Amino acid sequence: RGEFEHRTSIFEGAFRAWSHLGGLLPLDLETKPANDLDPLNFPLTDDIRLANSKKKVKKSGSDEGGAGPDVEDGEDNIDGVGGGGGVTAAQAQAQGGDDKRREYPYEPLPRSGLAHPFVQAILSPWLGPDADQDAIQLGLTTLRTWWQHRRKGESGSAIVALGTDRMRGVVEGYTRHFFNLAHCLVVNDKEQPPRTLHGKMRELEKSRNKKGKKRSREDESIKAAAMAFQSGFGPRKGGQMQ
């Protein structure tokens, strides 16, 4: 249980931080410090990603005759490498889980894997500094599996394991730590951002490029008009105007 709590608290904190970063606006990243975007003090409200996700689930259920999305046996018990031996979400709430837990939209891990410093930072506190290459690769596989299952929400076993006041504090500490790290990597080091944020950044860049081209054309028109004015109405020899 101790190993499970340790690993899951790291993964969950990183997941919440990456999810929060993905929901921010590019302009806020450019104009506000990380402290003013903190996921604990400034949680996102009315997150459109959650609304879109629920619409997809509802549509999937309608397409399948109201059965809802397929859920494999034990899927709610995922502890990072597979199901089994856990508890259901309903059992977790009965054992002290909070039915008002915040929902965090799913943001995929960086595609670059271990080449991305954020992924390295997730594995480091779990595996320790002495982990060899095989352990690191196995850790990456475990993280990817856990992260993919997190798409459907926290597992019941994780809710129970991290539901105490002490573990909630641990997860929040990791959330803030990983958010500050991810913010620095994306804003200062220009590392790959979460997918949703990346899309918004591209749209902002396109908009700015269009405005820049329009402004450039307007400047050229103004210059051309000024030159025409000067050539047509400027001073002539002998001090006479045309």
Image: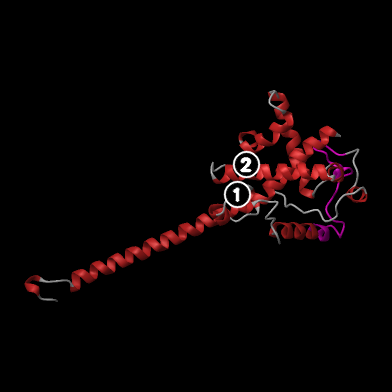
Quadrant of residue 142 within the rendered picture: top right
Q: Earlier in the sequence, mark 1 or mark 2?
A: 1
Q: Position of residue 118 (x, y in %)?
A: 64, 38
Q: Residue at x 61, y 53 (%)?
A: 36
Q: Gap in Å between the C-alphas at discs 1 and 2? A: 10 Å
Secondary structure at badge 1 equals helix
Secondary structure at badge 2 equals helix
Mark 1: give few (<14), some (14-19) or many (20+) Cα within 10 Å: some
| Residue segment shown in magenta | 60-83
Give the residue pinned by disc 1: 34
On the picture, is 30 further left or further right than 35?
left
Question: Is residue 109 shown to the viewer in this render?
Answer: no
Q: Label for residue 181?
A: 2
Amino acid under disc 2: Leu
Q: Residue at x 83, y 45 (%)?
A: 165
Point out the image quarter for the C terminus: bottom left
Q: Label for residue 162?
A: none
Q: Position of residue 84 (x, y in %)?
A: 89, 38
Q: Residue at x 58, y 45 (%)?
A: 186
Question: For residue 149: magenta?
Answer: no
Q: In front: 94, or 114?
A: 94
Mark 2: give few (<14), some (14-19) or many (20+) Cα within 10 Å: some
Q: Residue at x 85, y 41 (%)?
A: 161
Q: Position of residue 54 (x, y in %)?
A: 77, 58
